[in-house]
Image (cartoon, grey):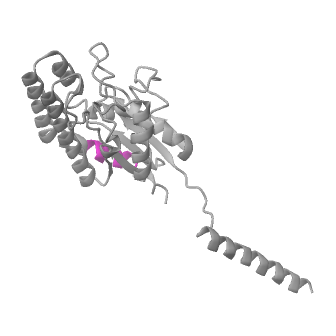
Amino acid sequence: MRSLRVIAIGVTALTTVCAAALIGGALPAHAATVNYVALGDSYASGVGTGSESGSCGQSSKAFGPLWAASNATSFTFAACSGATTAGVISSQLSSLSSSTTLVSVTTGGNDVGFSSIMETCVLESTSSCESAVDSAESYAENTLPGSLNTLLADIHAKAPNAKIVMLDYPDFYDTSVSICIGLSGADHTALDNGINILDGVIQTAAADNNATFADVRSAFSGHELCDGNDWLHSVDIFNIDESYHPTASGQADAYLPVFSAAAASVGQ
């Protein structure tokens, strides 16, 4: 009789498991270990969110810590405002190890001179603005690829088990809007063209180095400068560092979902 009862219990348990599988579509899985490190510049550190702190301008409202709060087993926030690609290599890669499973990196803007371009476009003529952007585009196309390739190779070497997600930069202006207070329409177009060339270089580097490219430009559509519901800070000559950086909404509603989608397969 005892053996029959054991069999009956086993059949009942198996039936319950099968029913759960049919209803839920799959059996519950153990949560994966996700050791996440966020690298990069001010777009990764969270400048512009209004809650930055420290010399690196880090904010809990940046996409990295926002994602980590609900998804990461461990999190290292290494991103730092003002970092160039060389700066990420020299100062941030010590955060990586063989146990790292996910890395995000946003870099390239400081290499091409975002801050100096902003100052030129705000304080000088349209022709000076266009010239500054042209120089940045040349650097992005001819010099930056080598720096990005070195960075990604170094990340792979220090974190061989990690998925790498490279994020880019949003277009600053909605150039379809005919009336927009601030810089001239020609300035707007030049800046957006420069951004798109930079983003294309970042995309190519990701493809060439086994990294996932996460493009935020479409996520900012309808929320660029001139749209009226901006997720970017407009030009401020008294706070150039914050100009063109994502607001807290830009981080939470654009960068975060784009990164989340790119990081979805980590640990699987």
Q: Which residues are magenta?
A: 150-159
In which quadrant of the rendered view does residue 56 lie?
A: top left
Is 154 included in the stretch rendered in magenta? yes
Residue 22 horizontal/vertical position (percent): 63, 74
Residue 141 located left or right of residue 202: left
Residue 207 horizontal/vertical position (percent): 26, 54
Of residue 262 and residue 250, the one placed in the foreground of this image is: 250
Q: Most extreme residue toward the front, as rendered?
A: 179
Q: Main secondary structure of the magenta part?
A: helix
For residue 47, above or below residue 255: above
For residue 124, above or below residue 134: above
For residue 54, above or below residue 2: above
Residue 255 horizontal/vertical position (percent): 39, 41
- Total tally of numbered discs in the picture: 0
Residue 211 located left or right of residue 15: left
Is 75 included in the stretch rendered in magenta? no
In which quadrant of the rendered view does residue 238 lie?
A: top left
Q: Quadrant of the N terminus?
A: bottom right
Whether residue 125 appears in this view of the structure is yes
Of residue 111 and residue 218, the one placed in the foreground of this image is: 218
In which quadrant of the rendered view does residue 132 lie?
A: top left
| Residue located 67% across and 76% down the image | 18
Residue 31 located left or right of residue 173: right
